[in-house]
Image (tube, rainbow, N blue to C red):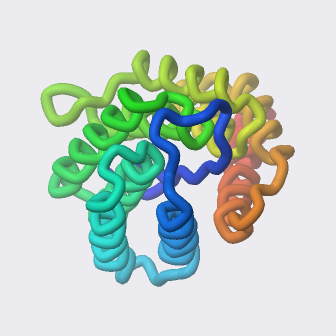
Amino acid sequence: MNALRTLIIATLGFATLPAFALSEGGEAQLHQLQTRWAEINYQTPEKQREEAFAKLVSQVDAALTSEPKAPELLIWRGIILSTQAGAKGGLGALGLVKEAKTNLEQALAIDPQALAGSAYTSLGSLYYQVPGWPIGFGDDEQAEKMLKQALAINPDGIDPNYFYGDFLQRQKRYEESRAVLEKALAAKDRPGRELADQGRRAEAAALLQQVTGKLQ
């Protein structure tokens, strides 16, 4: 389950008008969740992350009491649970990723376009990093399907390109992986997401270096 440690997803922007628009207060809460997530994931000591993510789940739960059908909040609940699972590790993390999967599927049922298709990115990441049957629900075919759907919605996004590049390198499809990772590094900055973008670019650059080494 240590592979789940890399499972971090953060995207902003709407491709179409969502079915359930967040209130102004909900938008503010969403930004707070995203900012805190990036601080925990990139700046908090590794041993403290699981507890910090658990507290963040409580915060998103509080936000969901006011807006239970907000797909953006459901997506971020799934994201936070996924990264909490990565921090926890081991078989004990399976319950968290299954709960995350449920949240992401709920968001897709409400609005697949929410947060530029981030639910597809998150689910795709789960499918290739979680163990397969009989332990978990991992499925590489389903992972690629979800990641391609995410890229259809947000073709130039840093996160869908990063995770698809990671998936491809795990499949030893190094030429394809290199091209996708280069696209991730060329992605535009996201307003208000400076720390998340900085962390993701560092991960993409490191992975691209590994992939390039495999091609030499």
Q: Residue 51, position in %: x, y?
A: 29, 78
Q: Nearer the viewer, residue 102 or 186?
A: 102
Task: Specify whether residue 99 is in view.
Answer: yes
Q: How many marks?
A: 0
| Vertical arrangement, residue 189 with respect to residue 214, above or below | below
Residue at x 30% of width, y 76% of height: 55
Q: Is residue 196 left or right of residue 184?
A: left
Q: Residue 77, position in %: x, y?
A: 36, 55
**Quarter of image, res 138:** top left
| Vertical arrangement, residue 211 with respect to residue 11, above or below | above
**Quarter of image, res 159:** top right
| Vertical arrangement, residue 42 with respect to residue 21, above or below | below
Q: Residue 161, position in %: x, y?
A: 68, 36
Residue at x 81% of width, y 37% of height: 183
Task: Specify whether residue 198 is in view.
Answer: no
Residue at x 49% of width, y 31% of height: 120
Q: Is residue 212 left or right of residue 131?
A: right
Q: Is residue 144 left or right of residue 190?
A: left
Q: Residue 100, position in %: x, y?
A: 30, 46
Residue at x 36% of width, y 78% of height: 52
**Quarter of image, res 67:** bottom left
Q: Nearer the viewer, residue 188 or 86?
A: 188
The quadrant the C terminus occupies is top right
Q: As drawn, which residue projects farthest toward the front?
A: 23
